[in-house]
Image (tube, rainbow, N blue to C red):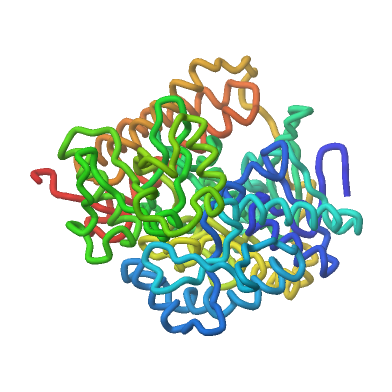
């Protein structure tokens, strides 16, 4: 229900990727009033949309135990087995019921059978794909389906709406008695980008599905605004966080001076491509018995070591010499994007560099997506469910988003009627700016954001040391104080919100990395004397 200064709904979902979209679908189809918001201007400003490789699923002849073992091994020994079992045993049913039967996602088929890919550290082919545009097709089909659900009046999708902070008791209540109650989330302050008004959105349940944080790094495969907004908001609301030091770097992003770090899918190596240095030496067997199909952290470090050894800015990924498939047919998006920059991948190797790609940690969530705060759920990349442990297995992230999107929605359906007096609107103050607002200075925003990204890349990147991390902590803490003052004095918009959240998230990642002295998975820390 719309009011002048606030909106009320049963469920508020923040984020429109596969996790948030799945939750919205299940909730709306079960008659739960749901609002889903995105800071993007359309449904495609998500990490899901950019996912190339595919979605892993348990096929009929596959062994569940082998799939579980693959994920556990990829997770460096610290994955949560119950979560891994859930994602594996739910995979076949949910992929079929939601993606295939409901959404009609056109997964690639050869001779009447699904064309399953094998990716790094998978023991066999089990990855459904739509060539190299799987995420794009999943996102498009979700949006079409959800637009139909909007007609039922049970779902409202609001683009151009940015979550500023979670509304939480007792912090956002003027009633002192709330201090003695269990902390609870009751909605969010949301910026309407068109009106520039910050309004209160009240909800019985709030679902964080805001995606990743990798664009706090200089080189990233994520959209530029993937800066950990959900993690920063959850931290300010005092939710528990976990495993933030485990930042996965994708080993192969296109390296070109004029190009963004476009992701070269792991499926390329799954189809036979091999990494070589600029001297023509294939090097992965020196670093792992699995060679070019080693887990991502091992491949990223191997590339980094080769680059350091020869002072190179990139290495080469040779698909042309080894592919037994029609390259242009199997990887049309990669082929076209490389060709834009004069690289014909059917004839020559691709220059690649590692880039920040995925956060294995996040807001701690249980098997149904519930967090440490009452009525707050976290699903998808923003969450830490324990599936990925210290290092995510390729093509499991879309699957996790699908499964936890469903599980969180099912829990909400079961429990939403338990709290009839959850919040009192009059207790929660309207949004107020603490200082007179000044016009945004784009030079300050850009410099502060670039500074944050350089600090993270150089001090908290693929290989870390205590000295580097201590320097990062000091520099970022100083920067945070400056940015918070800047934030309080500046007209509210996406750029200042992202800047504030990026430096906060960066600090949380560095602090977690500094506390963990054990190298494991995507967190690799060496002695300062090495």
Residue depicted at x 24% and y 55%:
284
Residue depicted at x 39% and y 65%:
389
Q: Residue furthest left?
A: 529
Give the camera-side residue of 432 and 37.
Answer: 37
How many discs appear?
0
Q: Is residue 230 visible?
A: no
Q: Is residue 17 visible?
A: yes
| Relative image position of residue 346 (x, y in whole percent) | 44, 44
Residue 518's image quarter? Answer: bottom left
Give the camera-side residue of 363 and 422.
Answer: 363
| Relative image position of residue 285 (x, y in whole percent) | 21, 59
Give the camera-side residue of 184 and 8.
Answer: 8
Residue 103's image quarter? Answer: bottom right
| Relative image position of residue 217 (x, y in whole percent) | 40, 37
Q: In this view, does 192 lie above or below 292?
A: above
Give the camera-side residue of 27 and 184.
Answer: 27
42 displayed left or right of 392: right
Q: Is residue 127 above or below residue 452?
A: below
């Amino acid at each position: 229900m719309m009011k002048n200064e606030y909106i009320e709904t049963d469920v508020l979902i923040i984020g429109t990727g596969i996790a948030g979209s799945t939750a919205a679908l299940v909730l709306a189809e079960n008659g739960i009033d749901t609002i889903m918001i995105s800071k993007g201007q359309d449904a495609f400003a998500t990490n899901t949309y950019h996912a190339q490789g595919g979605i892993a699923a348990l096929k009929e002849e596959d062994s569940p135990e082998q799939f579980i073992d693959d994920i556990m091994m990829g997770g460096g020994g610290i994955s949560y087995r119950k979560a891994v079992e859930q994602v594996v045993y739910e995979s076949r049913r949910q992929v079929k019921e939601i993606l295939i039967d409901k959404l009609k996602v056109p997964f690639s088929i050869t001779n009447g059978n699904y064309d399953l890919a094998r990716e790094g550290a998978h023991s066999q082919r089990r990855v459904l794909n739509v060539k190299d545009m799987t995420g794009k097709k999943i996102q498009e089909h979700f949006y079409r389906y959800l637009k139909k659900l909007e007609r039922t009046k049970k779902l409202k999708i609001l683009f151009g709406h940015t979550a500023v902070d979670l509304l939480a008791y007792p912090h956002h209540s003027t009633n002192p008695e709330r201090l003695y109650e269990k902390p609870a989330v009751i909605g969010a302050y949301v910026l309407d980008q068109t009106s520039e008004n910050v309004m209160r959105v009240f909800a019985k349940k709030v679902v964080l599905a805001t995606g990743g944080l990798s664009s706090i790094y200089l080189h990233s495969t994520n959209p530029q605004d993937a800066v950990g907004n959900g993690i920063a908001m959850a931290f300010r609301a005092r939710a528990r966080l976990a495993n933030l030091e485990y930042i996965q770097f994708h080993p192969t992003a296109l390296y070109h001076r004029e190009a963004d770090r476009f992701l070269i899918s792991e499926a390329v190596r799954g189809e036979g491509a091999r990494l070589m240095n600029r001297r023509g030496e294939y090097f992965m067997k020196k670093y792992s018995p699995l060679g070019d199909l080693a887990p991502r952290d091992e491949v990223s470090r191997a590339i980094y070591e080769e680059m350091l050894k020869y002072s190179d800015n990139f290495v080469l990924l040779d698909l042309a010499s080894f592919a037994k498939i029609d390259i242009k047919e199997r990887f049309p998006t990669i082929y076209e994007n490389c060709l834009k920059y004069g690289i014909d991948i059917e004839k020559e190797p691709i220059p690649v560099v590692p880039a920040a790609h995925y956060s294995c940690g996040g807001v701690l969530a249980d098997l149904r997506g519930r967090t440490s705060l009452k009525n707050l759920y976290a699903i998808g990349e923003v969450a830490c469910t324990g599936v990925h442990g210290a290092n995510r297995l390729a093509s499991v992230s879309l699957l996790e988003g699908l499964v936890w999107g469903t599980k969180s929605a099912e829990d909400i359906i079961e429990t939403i009627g338990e709290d009839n007096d959850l919040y009192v609107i009059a207790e929660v103050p309207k949004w107020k700016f603490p200082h007179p607002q000044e016009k945004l200075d784009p030079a300050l925003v850009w410099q502060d954001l670039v500074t944050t990204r350089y600090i993270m890349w150089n001090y908290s990147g693929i290989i870390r040391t205590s000295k580097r991390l201590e320097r990062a902590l000091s520099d970022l803490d100083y920067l945070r104080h400056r940015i918070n003052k800047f934030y309080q004095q500046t007209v509210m918009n996406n750029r200042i919100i992202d800047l504030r959240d990026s430096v906060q998230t960066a600090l949380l990642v560095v602090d977690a990395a500094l506390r963990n002295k054990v190298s494991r998975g995507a967190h690799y820390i060496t002695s300062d004397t090495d």
